[in-house]
Amino acid sequence: MKNNFLLFSALCLMAGACGHNDTIPQISKVDYVNPKIGSGGHGHVFVGANVPYGMVQAGPTSLPQTWDWTSGYHDSDSTVIGFSQTHLSGTGIGDLFDVTIMPVIGEVTYDRGTPDDYNTGLWSYADRSKEITKPGYYSVPLTRYGILAESTATNRVGVHRFTFPAAQDPAIVFDLQDGGCWDRPVETILDSVSPTRVTGLRRSKGWANDQSVYFVADFSQPFTSVTKHGKDDMFSRINFPATTEGTPIEVKVGISPTSVEKAIANLDAEATNLTFEEIAAQASQQWENELSRIEIVTDDPDELNKFYTALYHLTFHPSTFNDVGDNPEYTILSLWDTYRAQLPLLTILDPEKEAEIVNSMLDIYDQQGRLPVWHLWGNETDCMVGNPGIIAVADAVSKGLPGIDQERALNAMISTSNDTARGGGYRQQYGYIPYDLMEESIGYDMEYAIADAAIAHAARAMGKDDIAAEYDKRSKSYRNYFDPSTGFMRGKDSKGEWRTPFNPSYSNRGNDYTEGNAWQYTWLVPQDFEGLQELFGGKEQLISHLDSLFVASSEMVGDDVTPDISGLIGQYVHGNEPSHHIVYFYTMAGEREKAATLINQILDEQYSAAPDGLSGNEDTGQMSAWYIMSSLGFYPVEPALPRYWIGVPRYDKATINLPENKTFTVIKGAKGSEMTLNDQPLGRDYITHDEIMNGGTLVIPVFN
């Protein structure tokens, strides 16, 4: 990536200035993307071939099934058990890896295997020195077999090309046994229906309690036979005639969550009449279109890599969950993470898509009786705390996104908020969730309070002030946890007594907080900055406590501290979502310069262009969304309130290409200059959603 940019820069210098010589080649934005960013450390990003919001994520799956391999890939490991059609990106739990195919030669052991011996399975090492990764395309040589594996994808079809050496017994094995980490097969079927087609089903139980993936696979040349192997015949070997050196065999795998017939229809609609090269070019163009939603001006190649890779990772999920011709539905909804910045960013970049996602969430409400928490391939996993689905829906309503039935949405939000499950009943009884009745009591209750405030914003936008007043009151439940003697949010039992002993740095799993401690959760009040300031005794006291967060010892106390607590600056945790809004509290307190200093520090230290380039799990796009919005210079601190607090722009100029051919441009202003919107003094440190969507130019002065 960097070499391409440097070559382009050199051409610009020789010509005198870019843009004044039509013969100078323009670099596509896909060329700035480095898909390996976040594939090391704890980033957990998917590496392979997909398209924006695709049902399919076609790419390699490795041997390990531990935490850092939840996407199926890690930069530290080069084993491959095959090429699966579905993967997760950036999650803290593993699943999917459905319909895994592996090209082989000769006799193999039909099992996942272990890395000490090829004889334990059909796996191979991959030659990562020759690996090619770019949006919509992946390739790598498999050293065990001397086979070059390539993958590309449409929305619902994984497309693979395996180039074989001269071999007497080449084959492609369908592995329906091995899924993602904790996933186990319940039912597997593979039928040969013609000399070039097989169909089947993989039904499994894991993080998703009951997941079905129906599939059809078409081959570019006839196979000679299909033989069954392994435990319960869950491996099917598709045998081909002898190959000569360089013989390619292509396979197109269409998938569906509903039926084999729908999988066939998906394949026919998206891939049947296209070549591998045409599909790869189409995927690349889809990514180019998505990345072109924002244009940045910078002379730093690493910044281009980081920004456009973040924009690339932003739209891996939510994933399409409907067949061709059906109403749009989406799954892989990691809402506790993405309500904070990813989904709000989509209301700017692609409001039509965000409206489809929200309508899909309302459909899920109709099916299960409450809005989703963490929806995965037709299953509610109930992973994480609070009611994050409410917040995402409320954000769309308060911003007036078209195509959403607001009354239907409000009904779904109110009904979900009154559910007594997951601590809701305790909250109704006590006004808060007592720690002696439920683990992670503060984590649940404080997220419920944020969701209540979101309902208030949505109701107010609809002119329903009585409902807004009710939910404003409910959103203050966090106050029950504030201990003025310590200045921290602290567990309280059903008798109203504080948890003792108390150490704000204590952070065992299953304590009063969720993936955090009192240092972070004291600031989890994005919905009521003024109320939090009042609890501290005023602005100066709040700022003093906020300062202490970033200079405290980073030591975590406890016998079982979750690895999700990562990316620390003092006790600020950028690698996990509850901290993401905190630096913007400085702006809200009238100290934007302090916010700017910390934002730049986070952008510099917590993100890089290396494989270990994310300080925590990508979390299906939230880590990248924080980078994008903070680099642009503004962030949605108050969930579902349609305004953004201003930090500091990272680039000389950034332009958002909005719907209706409008643009919104952010320009880095000189130190000491005035903040302006459309050449008029802004006079405040936030900008509204409508001001952005109307288009214009915002000039934000820097401090150095």
Image: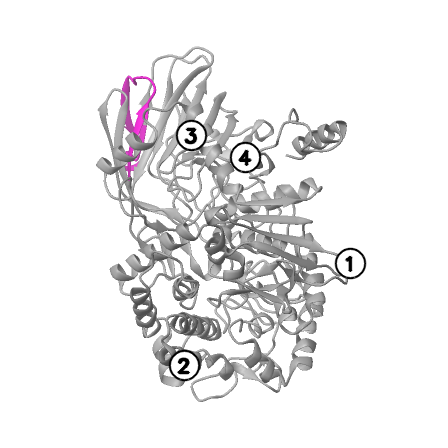
* Corner quadrant of residue 236: top left
- Where residue 150 appears, as percent x and y from the top left, is 47, 27
Q: Secondary structure at mark 1?
A: loop
* Three-letter residue code for mark 1: Asn
Residue 15 in picture, x, y percent from top left:
74, 27
Q: Which residue is mark 3?
A: 122
**Quadrant placement of the C terminus:** bottom right
Q: Is residue 106 visible?
A: no
Q: Is residue 526 visible?
A: yes
Given contact means CB atoms under 8 Å apart, are the residues at marks 4 and 2 in contact? no
Q: Residue 119 location, x and y as percent?
A: 45, 29
- In three-dimensional space, the C-alpha distance between marks 4 and 1, rounded to whole angstroms, equals 44 Å
* Chain part drawn in magenta: 214-236
Secondary structure category for the residue under label 3: loop
The residue that mark 2 highlights is 469
Mark sitting on residue 704: 1
